[in-house]
Amino acid sequence: MFIGGRWVDSEDAATLDVVNPANQEVLARIPKASREDARKAIDAASEAARVAAKLPAHERSRILLKVASMLEQNSQEMVETIAKNVGKPVADAAVETARAVLVLTFAAEEAKRITGQTIPLDSQPFPPGNQNRLAFTIREPVGVVGAISPFNFPLNLLMHKVAPAIAAGNSVVAKPPSEGPLPALMIAKLFEQAGLPDGVLNIVVGPGETVGDEIVISEKVNAISFTGGSETGKEISQKAARTNKKVILELGGHNPMIVLDDANLEAAVSSAVSSTFTFSGQVCTATRRIILSEKLRSKFMASFDQAVAGLKVGNPLEQTTNVGPVISRKSLDKIEGLVEDAKSKGAVARKGGNRLVSEEYSRGNYFAPTVLDEVEGDMKIANSEVFGPVAAVMKASKEEEFVDAANSTTYGLQASIYTSDLAKGIKLAKEIKAGAVLINDRTTLRWDNAPFGGVKMSGMGREGVSYAIAELTDLKFIVVNLG
């Protein structure tokens, strides 16, 4: 673990095996943090918070740029680590690594742009004497930020928490996922080499019910940035409220893709395949429901089936692999259960619908790319986040049916609409309850310095470097009476 600028073992010498989901190979054995280890990391971050706040913006920027440069120079090692640790195909792992470099670079730039504004009090008649008052706002770091990140983007989602927090002058206690901790430990080494003061970044890996819980409930932690499941997010929000912490929650999604009669068929099919099956569907912004116009349905499904049949399932270290393993056997069980429930209620598996158990796949956690047709709203898969390579196809005819279907879950992260009529697309976009609606584009798209986040059970607060900095700073109002 990385605590207070030192690499240390767990307090009770417990260890955790890090496993490759493609073949169950043990990649590493690392310390498994305890609640006491988490407290030590929090104490180190608390002691370093004053140092972090006083670190000049140009120095914070320099450190972040240095880390970005070193990550870029060592990108191939990081790509292979991501591929082995979480089963992400190397082509996708390369994109993730490149984006993490961008996040660090954006944070370095934004560190020098954190400003307040002047407030013209003389525009207000009360209280008297405002013509003699100078008023302005400044932004100050919140203090200690708890960063809890998931396995599916083990590098970039962590950087979306750590980089803005450091750019804003905070210290950080980070808990990467137990299933995919190695990229986080590698990036901590780069921060150490870049000269980040001791204790400003601390990394502990361990169970959410102990390590994560301690970070959330600690009075020394001033803000939580969490990406993960909606139920866990709800618990975090409730516990964080007891100490009045700031909270950014990036939670689950059940993202609809609406395809209208006048859609560009080729573009819609390409988008559906990419946004459903990238990283085996283990992406919170993945398309979960494809809602088709009846007029376009038969042509869309013929092209979609053909494209899905052409996906290559296999070793994530091979450049030609499109779909790798899912993260664990537990995930396989969940995916299989949701698919079987849908089939028992009338859904039809046009493609896949099963685990891959042949000799080639038997040691890994592989599920066949699946197309479920005739999905209805009462099926679990129409409302539960499957987090696997499964497309659920639904139908609608009237405009209000598309909106109702899109809004029918408790989630509201992203949505997409395919249509040639932009006026109609914008009208529907305004009626869909989601943090983002993309017209003629994929649900999986995200820009690293643009606002990102959901509504309803998909979260609260916004990420995107400059937006996260605003969330992880406190606004202070200062008035000077010059009279």
Image (cartoon, grey):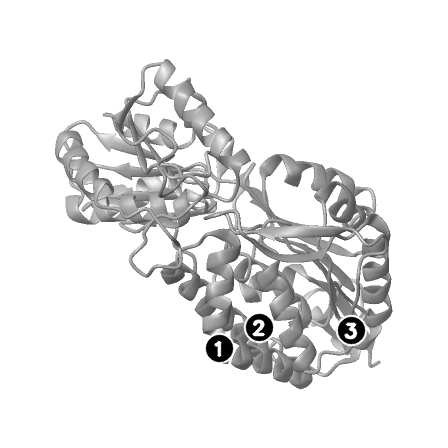
**Residue marked by disc 1:** 72
Name which residue type carries label 1: Glu
Residue 124 coordinates in the image, percent (x, y): 70, 64
**Residue marked by disc 3:** 5
Which of the two labelled residues, at mark 1 and mark 2, occupies the earlier sequence position?
Answer: 1
The quarter in which the N terminus is drawn is bottom right
Give the Cα distance between marks 1 and 2: 15 Å
Q: Is residue 359 visible?
A: yes
Disc 3 to disc 2: CB gap under 8 Å: no
| Outermost top residue | 345
* Left or right side of 403 for 398: left
Closer to the camera: disc 1 or disc 2?
Answer: 1
Which of the two labelled residues, at mark 3 and mark 1, occupies the earlier sequence position?
Answer: 3
Name which residue type carries label 3: Gly
Residue 96's disc is none
Disc 1 to disc 2: CB gap under 8 Å: no
Residue at 32% across, 41% down: 427
Residue 250 coordinates in the image, percent (x, y): 57, 48
Q: Is residue 115 visible?
A: no
Above or below, 33 relative to 120: above
**Residue marked by disc 2:** 107
Crowd class of label 2 (few under 14; some 14 to 19; many from 20; radius 10 Å): many
| Outermost front residue | 359
Residue at 51% across, 44% down: 327
Name which residue type carries label 2: Ala
Disc 3 to disc 1: CB gap under 8 Å: no
